[in-house]
Amino acid sequence: MSTKTETLKSRDISGFVTKYAIYIVLVVLVIGIAIYDPRFLSVSILRDILLQSSTRVIIALGAAFILITGGTDLSTGRIVGLTAVISASMLQTQDYGRRFFPDLPHMPLLVPILIAIVAGLLVGLINGIIVAKLKVPPFIATLGTMVAVYGANSLYFDMKPNQSQPIGGLRADFSKLGTGSIGSNATYSIPYIVIIAIVVAILVWIVFNKTKLGKYMYAIGGNIHAAVVSGINVNRYLIYIYSIAGALYGLAGVLEAARTGGATNNYGNMYELDAIAACVVGGVSTSGGIGTVPGVLAGVLIFSVINYGLTFIGISPYWQLIIKGVIIVAAVAFDMRKYMNSK
């Protein structure tokens, strides 16, 4: 009897660890760094980590849409770069010496932001059409758009009179979006960009869990053939999903330009790999059909803690890359083991 009880307890513990592994890893990371240097638990450090994570969260949530359908998106980073350049080029101060558009009149802040987001949405729409209508595998489709978008962005960035000069001199109201905060005390204030990321995360959670789009997204990723047989218009919903992802990348590009105070055509380089890695570590299955918003948030925070925390205690960036690589491989191996066990 006692042996049976011990077996049940062992299974319960194993199930708990499996279910909450990502959060356990995050807590262990924070505790480990804090033991080495207790200053890591200060409010200012937490604020900095959240600030740096904000745009990455939005990008990773966009990538999660596509990964859950069983696809992948390699154009993510280049869409971020394109939208950062578009928004920054139209939101420079009137007296800046090297304006991208010398004769462009002052526009309401929301107009260039919406233009940039729509540009991201259009690229996502193109990705969705290529995948859904032309039946090109997502890896190849988004690889092609990644290269094409970078080329288009570079041509735009090289236009006269800018000619590939870093875009600076951004308007105060735009920069405030990325660096401003609520609260008079700098340490305890809440950055606007963090609030935006939280709002986006809540909206995405609602889409994932409370809408027809979310239900069909999981169905497509779980078994696309069964989804077709059940009457789901797979092509239409894939186009919707890729378009939403593109819009989220566009928003992230705008916020990245506002946060850093400028933009170049190389912004967003390799962001797609960070986003995919955060999703996979956060429990989004590479086989499709599985993934949660809290998991994605935890995945982003894990990599932010690694980047910020290990730099904080003086560990070489090269070791950070090794640690990140090991975590990614372990997460995928764990995901594949669960997938094979479920077959």
Image (spheres, rainbow, N blue to C red):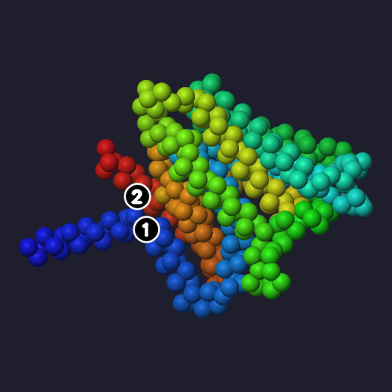
What residue type is disc 1 on? Ala
Residue position marked by numbered label 1 in the rendering = 21
Residue position marked by numbered label 2 in the rendering = 334
Residue 119 lies, in percent from the top left, at 69, 36
Looking at the image, residue 110 sits to the left or right of residue 314; the answer is right
Q: SS class of the residue under badge 1?
A: helix
Q: Earlier in the sequence, mark 1 or mark 2?
A: 1
- The residue at 87%/52% (across/down) is 93
Looking at the image, residue 83 sits to the left or right of residue 214; the answer is right
Give 46 or 329, whichever is nearer the viewer: 46
Q: Answer yes or no: do the residues labelled 1 and 2 have beta carbons within 8 Å?
A: yes
Quadrant placement of the N terminus = bottom left
Q: Looking at the image, can residue 78 be seen?
A: no
Quadrant placement of the C terminus = top left
- The residue at 53%/46% (across/down) is 204
Give 233 or 156, whichever is nearer the viewer: 233
Q: SS class of the residue under badge 2?
A: helix
Q: Disc 1 and disc 2: Cα gap in Å?
A: 10 Å
| Mark 2 crowd level (few <14, some 14–19, many ≥20, 10 Å Cα) | some
What residue type is disc 2 on? Phe
On residue 339, the disc is none
- The residue at 70%/47% (across/down) is 254
Residue sticking out furthest to the top: 134
| Mark 1 crowd level (few <14, some 14–19, many ≥20, 10 Å Cα) | some
Residue 294 lies, in percent from the top left, at 46, 53
